[in-house]
Structure formats: C-alpha cells, structure tokens
Image (tube, rainbow, N blue to C red):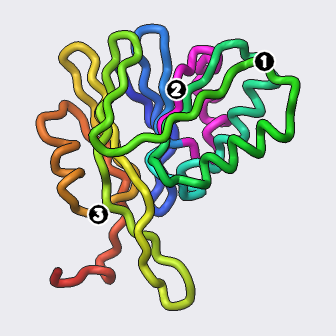
Amino acid sequence: MNTTVLYSQAGIATQIVISVEEDYFIVDAGDGTLRDLLHEKIDLRKIKGIFLTHGHYDHMAGLYALLGHFRIIERKEKIDIYFPQGCKEVEQVVLAFKRSYDDFIFKIRIHRINGGDKIKIKDLKIKIFQMKHYAAVGKNRILHPDAAVGYQFIHHDKIIAISGDTGMCPGLIELVRGVDVAYIDSTFKEEEATDT
C-alpha cells in the first residue's frame, strides 16, 4: 500500500491517492483532482473508490469533473463514493451529474458512512472515525458543526490514517493511534490560538 499526495496547501484540502496492488482509492477530491490524477498518469479505470472526509468545496469540488471524465473515457467499472452521513453537498453533486447525463455506462454507488463503520474491499480494510469539524461562516465568523470523518486504511500490516479538516477530538486521537503514517489536514493560524 502506497500513498501519493496529489495536492496540499494550507486552507485548501489535501488530495491523496492510495494504491493497493492494481487498485487506486482517492481521499478527498477538491478542485484540480482530475488534472493531478492525469499528471500522475493514474489509470482512472482502476480507481475503485472515492472517500470524502466532508462536504466542503475544497474537499469535493472535483467530484463532478471526475464523474464527467469517467463518462468521456466510457468507463465501465462501477465507482463507489463514501462520505459522512448528513453530507448533502456530495449527494447533490452526484444527483446533478445523474440528471445531466443519461448516456454514461458506469454505475455510481453512494455510501453514507458514520464513525465506527468498517468497509472491506478485497484485502483492504477501512475503518471510519468521527471527526470534529466546525466551519466559520458569515460576517461574524459563526462556527457551526459539519459532518466529518477520518479513515484508517489497513492492508496486511500497514495502516495509513487520513483526516480532513479537524480539530483535536477523541476521534482524531483514536484515528492516529498505532498507525504507520498519518495525514492530518488542519490549518491553524497563531493569531487564532486561545487558552482552551
């Protein structure tokens, strides 16, 4: 099991590709993911799953482009898309794609997931952990919670942990406990520090 970071910048999501034998899995699909996959010469027909940590634009804006490109290359293989229960943004993108085109031949399977869920794909096991993510919106930067998860990818004896935006929380501590590699997507500016 290997990982490739497609893109990472503070304040913009980190897109990661996990390769397991001949299969690929994407974690988060922000804007530019398709371009970065093509640049890395990844066979898009071998992408078996797209795992989204939450529904903010920088984590899933490239999903429509991926689905559109799958249509153009006449992908036949199904694609599984995993995202947190309550993440309406992803459902809306998939629904918009399905309503826009009736000539694509691959099947899109969506999976609404929660912390504690487990997934098995061939020899790959994936454990889901609940993350704590608050979005600051509006003129007064009001915080509101958003559905968010982290993933542990387990293949043989190797464990890779990946979180989207998160703050310190019990789920994050459990996500990274005992793993070989952890990718944590979080931006914290010094001027935002508090005593709590």
Image coords of residue 191 (percent x, y): 32, 83
Circle count: 3
- Residue drawn where x is 55% and y is 27% of the image: 80
Q: Name the residue tied to disc 3.
A: 167
Q: Are marks 1 and 2 in contact (CB under 8 Å)?
A: no
Q: CA distance from mark 1 to mark 2?
A: 17 Å
Residue 194 belongs to magenta span: no
The span picked out in magenta is 29-51
- For marks 3 and 2 on the same chain, the one whose residue lies earlier in the sequence: 2
Amino acid type indicated by mark 1: Ile
Secondary structure beneath label 3: loop
Sequence-earlier tag: 3 or 1: 1
Quarter of the image with the C terminus in it:
bottom left
Name the front one of labels 1 and 2. 1
Instruction: Name the disc covering residue 105, or none.
Output: 1
| Residue 47 among those drawn in magenta | yes
Res 31 label: none
Q: Is residue 132 above or below residue 79?
A: below
Spatial CA distance of label 3 from label 2 is 26 Å
Mark 3: amino acid: Gly
- Check disc 2 and report the residue beneath it: 49
Q: Earlier in the sequence, mark 1 or mark 2?
A: 2
When asked about the image quadrant of residue 189, the answer is bottom left
Residue lying at 36% horizontally and 26% vertically, measured from the top left: 119
